[in-house]
């Protein structure tokens, strides 16, 4: 089973959308998580294309400035909107929980800076609950958080940090309960999934924001996790896509 996550940038760049969707389809995903999704005519183009791939099961949220999350799948699922129970002012559309027949997935587009604190806190509680029940589960998408030392290119290899995530401590707590898929497969590699500008990246200005976390019950099924930086280098988005392959 293949899960692909891509930030489509502000609802999708209309002039680039067909190329972005073709690149998504070329990976043959069984499940897609589109962040910065918007319920607009451009959003309907994304949903229609996904239905053409066999992704007949879909659910989406409305979120910050209209940005939210769309999950499309070839497998039926039950959608849980605003699983954290956040009030309207706290960006409740930043997460959507998808309950599949034998596992759970949370599609994410977490807001910037400290605004993501309640979302990360919920993911920690959710991880604990899934672990206690021994259930396979994943949280995937644009988490807008990470490790200060390695997930910010300007900090890599330096004793003194040039920049930092305000939520790094919460992110560290999430790592205590679940395993980050890409890091598990590439512990000695440095890659970055977002740069301030699309196309050829600025030097040492990257951030690794797009992540997938797996519960202990799902981790043995992890085959691979990798980025497709072509989405960003070809200016289809300002993010790279994250692809996670699972057995079963």
Image: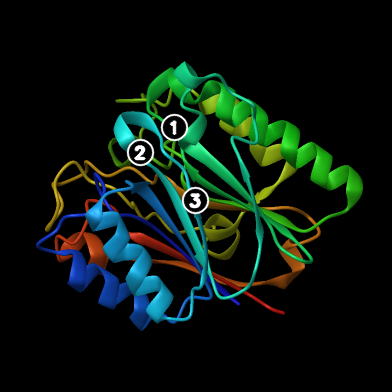
Q: Name the residue under label 1.
A: 148
Which residue lies at the image location 72% right of the left edge and 62% below the top edge? 219
Instruction: Say which of 43 and 207 sits in front.
Output: 43
Secondary structure beneath label 2: loop
Tell me which numbered mark, 3 or 1, is placed earlier along the sequence: 1
Q: In this view, does 133 lie above or below 85?
A: below
Which residue of the protein is positioned furthest toward the right in this rendering?
A: 133
Find numbered disc 1 in the image and state the secondary structure of the residue it sits on: loop
Q: How crowded is mark 2: few (under 14 residues within 10 Å), some or many (20 or more)?
A: many
Pinpoint residue 209: horizontal percent, then vertical percent: 40, 44
Residue 102 relative to residue 82: left or right: right
Q: Which residue is drawn at 89% across and 43% down?
A: 132
- Count residues near mark 3 (Cα–Cα under 10 Å), then give few for <14, some for 14-19, many for 20+: many
Residue 176 or residue 139, whichever sits in front: 139
Q: Residue 211 carries which label?
A: 3
x and y percent of residue 136 in the render? 77, 59
């Amino acid at each position: 089973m293949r899960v692909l996550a891509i930030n489509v940038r502000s609802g999708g760049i209309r002039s680039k959308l067909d190329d972005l969707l073709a690149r998504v389809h070329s990976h043959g995903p069984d499940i897609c998580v589109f962040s910065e999704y918007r319920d607009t005519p451009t959003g309907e183009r994304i949903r229609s294309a996904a239905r053409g791939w066999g992704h007949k099961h879909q659910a989406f949220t409305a979120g910050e400035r209209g940005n939210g999350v769309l999950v499309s799948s070839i497998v039926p699922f039950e959608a849980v909107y605003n699983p954290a129970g956040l009030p309207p002012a706290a960006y409740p559309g930043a997460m959507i929980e998808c309950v599949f027949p034998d596992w759970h997935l949370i599609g994410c587009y977490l807001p910037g800076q400290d605004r993501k604190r309640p979302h990360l806190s919920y993911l920690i509680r959710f991880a604990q609950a899934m672990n206690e029940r021994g259930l396979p589960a994943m949280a995937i998408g644009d988490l807008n958080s990470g490790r200060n030392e390695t997930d910010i290119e300007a900090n890599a290899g330096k004793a003194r940090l040039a920049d930092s995530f305000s939520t790094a401590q919460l992110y560290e707590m999430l790592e205590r309960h679940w395993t980050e898929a890409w890091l598990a497969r590439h512990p000695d590699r440095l890659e970055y999934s977002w740069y301030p500008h699309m196309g050829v990246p600025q030097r040492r200005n990257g951030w690794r924001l797009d992540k997938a976390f797996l519960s202990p019950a799902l981790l043995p099924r992890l085959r691979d996790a990798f980025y497709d930086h072509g989405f960003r280098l070809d200016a289809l988005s300002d993010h790279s896509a994250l692809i996670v392959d699972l057995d079963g």
